[in-house]
Image (cartoon, rainbow, N blue to C red):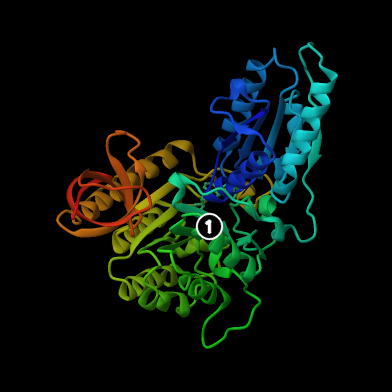
């Protein structure tokens, strides 16, 4: 039985894409290798969003190719965002690489790899291979969004990702994604609902809808009874019996309409958590970032959602050290963090990306200042996050049990509606169950509870 090994960097979209690729290999009789040394096909799904992520993937591929020198048939491939933006250039950086496939070619990865593996096994050379086959597929096929289909439930089988749209046309000045993921493109609602029903029939209880700007799903469709296509999709998913929870990631203030705020009042399956990237709390920086709205819009959307759903947990992404960011701009970001009281925030130091306008801006911020702001903001974020977690001690939360705890296999772990991981200290629990749990203890980011 041939084996495939897939390593994934980057966002949930990438995880979802890797699952689709894995499902295609499995249905053709391959096994998933737990270590790359045993694999016949080695794939890395790449992220381009920051330089570090690219360097990690390149370094990893270099090591894997060197380790496998004695197995000349092994097929090595890069998939995803870095493949899309660097294309053939990657063969220069890793000469032993065989295949490079872009973000609109995931459905072709299996056949490209399998064909090459069969050819190599037939040729049966024992010579080490210094150069790969150098096959590059980064184009776009018509109707590719309808190819986003077969799927493996993840994380213990009761939760799954469902891709509903791809691409981004916002052109934020720092971001490489419009180059790597292309134009916006939504899947037909009927396909999404069909996939969701199939997943639920296979034991999935919680679905996370994925898209670069998930709330711009079906943006060209009409508004009906005040509801846009995204909220209509949420309503339809809500009707699926056996589906207990719905999440989505990530939304954007542009196209975030009141109907989505209101959805938190009448769709109980919609979880009490939103990951809503803020990027900066300064209007001047938002403008330089080419984000066409004022920060007050972002803040008031957060507050309106909290009004609609008082226990809503809000997490965010923030970039520090964007070109031209002054102490004053940075302090506005910090003030916004204090005002919203985020449950958590991912803080990124600005990383210049090729072919993006911000990389060419004057007034790039030096590493020391980026690090100082990162460190300072992290302290604020952690203090607020810890306080919000502490406040949950003594409350009852419904948790979806996902499986054994990662740190202690004797214990089970689940997630609250607010997306907080909760370790079960007492009481019986099986994966896939939705159980009431009393929170008894909190150590920073980890919550502990007892089944009620
Ligand atoms: N530098 C630093 N962070 C970035 N992000 C996107 N592009 C960059 C960049 N060039 C961050 C944004 C985004 C998250 C996925 O990555 O905050 O929301
Ligand atoms: Fe990375 Fe962004 Fe692509 Fe996701 S969409 S894989 S974060 S570059």
The residue at the point 67 percent across, 28 percent down is 2
Q: Position of residue 286 (x, y in %)?
A: 50, 62
Above/below status of 175 relative to 222: above
Secondary structure beneath dot 1 equals: helix
Q: Is residue 423 visible?
A: yes
Q: Quadrant of residue 61?
A: top right
Q: Quadrant of the C terminus?
A: bottom left
Left or right of 324? Residue 411 is left
Q: Quadrant of residue 342?
A: bottom left
Left or right of 202? Residue 96 is right
Choose between 363 and 215: the one closer to the eye: 215
Choose between 341 and 4: the one closer to the eye: 4
The residue at the point 66 percent across, 56 percent down is 148
Above/below status of 165 relative to 381: below
Above/below status of 374 relative to 188: above
For label 1, the crowd category at 10 Å Cα-Cα, with few meaning under 14, some 14 to 19 and many 20 or more, is many
Q: Position of residue 246 (x, y in %)?
A: 44, 63
Report the residue that reaches farthest toward the bottom. 225
- Ligand 2 closer than 8 Å to label 1 CB: no
Left or right of 235? Residue 309 is left
Choose between 137 and 300: the one closer to the eye: 137
Q: Is residue 353 visible?
A: no
Choose between 165 and 350: the one closer to the eye: 165
The residue at the point 70 percent across, 12 percent down is 70
The residue at the point 65 percent across, 53 percent down is 357
Q: Position of residue 196 (x, y in %)?
A: 54, 62
Above/below status of 90 relative to 402: above
Left or right of 181? Residue 412 is left
Q: Quadrant of the N terminus?
A: top right
Q: Position of residue 295 (x, y in %)?
A: 44, 67
Residue that mark 1 sits on: 199
């Amino acid at each position: 039985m041939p084996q495939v090994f897939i390593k994934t960097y980057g966002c949930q979209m990438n995880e979802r894409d890797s699952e689709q690729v894995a499902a295609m290999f499995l249905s053709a009789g391959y096994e998933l290798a737990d270590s790359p040394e045993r694999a016949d096909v080695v794939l890395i799904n790449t992220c381009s969003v920051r330089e570090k992520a690219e360097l990690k993937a390149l370094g990893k591929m270099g090591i894997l190719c060197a380790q496998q020198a004695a197995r000349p048939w092994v097929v090595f491939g890069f998939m995803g965002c870095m493949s899309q933006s660097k294309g053939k250039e990657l063969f220069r950086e890793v000469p032993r690489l065989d295949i490079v496939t872009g973000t609109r070619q995931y459905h072709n990865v299996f056949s490209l790899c399998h064909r090459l593996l069969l050819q190599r096994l037939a040729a049966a050379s024992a010579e080490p291979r210094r150069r790969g086959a150098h096959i590059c597929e980064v184009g776009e096929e018509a109707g590719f969004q309808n190819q986003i289909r077969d799927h493996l439930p993840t994380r213990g089988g009761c939760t799954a990702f469902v891709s509903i749209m791809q691409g981004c046309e916002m052109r934020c000045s720092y971001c490489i994604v419009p180059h790597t993921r292309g134009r916006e493109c939504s899947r037909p609602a009927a396909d999404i609902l069909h996939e969701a029903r199939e997943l639920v029939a296979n034991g999935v209880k919680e679905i996370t809808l994925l898209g670069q700007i998930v709330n711009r799903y079906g943006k060209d469709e009409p508004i009906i009874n005040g509801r846009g296509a995204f909220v209509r999709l949420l309503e339809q998913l809500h009707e699926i019996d056996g589906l207990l929870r719905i999440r989505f990631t990530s939304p954007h203030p542009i196209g975030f309409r009141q109907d989505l705020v209101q959805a938190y009042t009448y769709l109980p399956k919609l979880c009490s958590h939103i990951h809503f990237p803020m990027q900066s709390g300064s209007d001047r920086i938002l403008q330089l970032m080419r984000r066409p709205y004022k920060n007050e819009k972002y803040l008031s959307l957060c507050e309106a959602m909290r009004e609609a759903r008082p226990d809503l947990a809000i997490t965010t992404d923030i970039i520090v050290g964007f070109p031209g960011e002054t102490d004053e701009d940075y302090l506005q970001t910090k003030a916004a963090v204090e005002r919203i009281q985020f449950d958590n925030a991912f803080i990124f130091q600005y990383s210049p990306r090729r072919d993006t306008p911000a990389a060419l801006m004057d007034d790039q911020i030096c590493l020391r200042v980026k690090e100082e702001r990162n460190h300072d903001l992290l302290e604020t974020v952690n203090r607020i996050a810890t306080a919000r977690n502490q406040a949950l001690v003594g409350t009852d939360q419904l948790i979806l049990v996902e499986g054994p705890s990662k740190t202690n296999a004797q214990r089970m772990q689940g997630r609250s509606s607010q997306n907080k991981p909760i370790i079960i200290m007492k009481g019986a629990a099986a994966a896939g169950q939705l159980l009431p749990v009393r929170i008894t203890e909190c150590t920073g980011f980890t919550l502990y509870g007892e089944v009620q």
